[in-house]
Image (cartoon, helix red, strand yellow):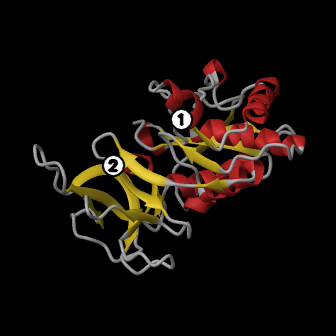
Amino acid sequence: GVVERHWVFNRKTYPGFGSHGSCPDPKLLDQYIEWLRNDRPYLLKALATYLVAIARRILDRGDTGICVPVIKTMGSRVTPNQRQLLEAAFQGTFWDDYGSAEFGSMAAECACHDGLHVFDDFFIIEAVDEAGVPVPDGKLGRLVVTDLINHAMPLLRYEIGDVGSVVRERCDCGLETPRVWVSGRKQDLLIDSCGKWRTHDDVVDFLEAIPGVLTAQVTRRRGGTLEVSVVEQESGVIDRDSVAERFGRWLGTAAKVVVNVTPTLRPEAGGKFRYVRGDQL
């Protein structure tokens, strides 16, 4: 056991950001970068917020001395744009998988990185509409899971709380197992004026693409007001009215949009970060 833990599967655990939230002091981020430079990990796994903050600091420094072959998240997800950021900064490949406390690991990427292959010997994952009817392949729906291995207390079409899509066509890797794309939590959906779902990935990538916005969190308040807490980039001050107008136009909603500037975003009580809080009524 000692040999395994210290030489074969040697693992180091770094401390979290603590009270710094999503945007710690650059000196703290520099400490993480030095740890990574010295330890030279093959695999780096952390909350998406931590990985993104460190990656941005690496790119800001123009540091090319960090190379981590495998990048993964724990307990949270990265958006498509953030995935590109992580791979550019750590000079490695991001590998995604899908699991939960109820079921364990249920799906994982292949080398094509085109969806997550469901472990269909053990699970059936479906995307369904509000009535529980399966939606067409590739269409966004509520994910439900059927467990084929739990004989003591089987869960049938268990609504796990996520939204995503499922396709059943053959992957370029040769596998014919169903593939799932997970887009975020159902409770964190925003609905635009056309009734279209705007998922966690949609909202975060849109806001972080606005000039001057480093990151942001959207909270739906009582009465439908959307409160956008924005962390500014170091380069300058954002126009809050412009951000509010742009976000409201993107959603096509009549709801009031209020933009506030904050130095950092705080985690939830459980330690995870939520960037779209659609259930704060």
Q: Position of residue 16 (x, y in %)?
A: 61, 24
Residues 126 and 92: in front is 92
Q: Which mark is residue 161?
A: 2
Tell me if residue 228 can be seen: no
Quadrant placement of the C terminus: top left
Circle 1 is placed at which residue position?
A: 273
Q: Position of residue 164 (x, y in %)?
A: 41, 61
Q: Residue at x 62, y 22 (%)?
A: 15
Q: Residue at x 85, y 37 (%)?
A: 234
The local crowd at label 1, few if under 14, some if 14 to 19, many if 20 or more residues have their Cα within 10 Å, is many
Q: In the image as oriented, which residue stretches furthest toward the front? A: 3
Could you tell whether 102 is left or right of 23 in the image?
Answer: left
Q: Position of residue 128 (x, y in %)?
A: 28, 65
| Residue type of the residue flagged with mark 2 | Gly
| Cα distance in 3D space between marks 2 and 1 | 17 Å
Quadrant placement of the N terminus: top left
Check the image and report above or below for 71 versus 113: above
Q: Are marks 2 and 1 in contact (CB under 8 Å)?
A: no
Q: Secondary structure at mark 2?
A: strand
Check the image and report above or below for 57 versus 179: above
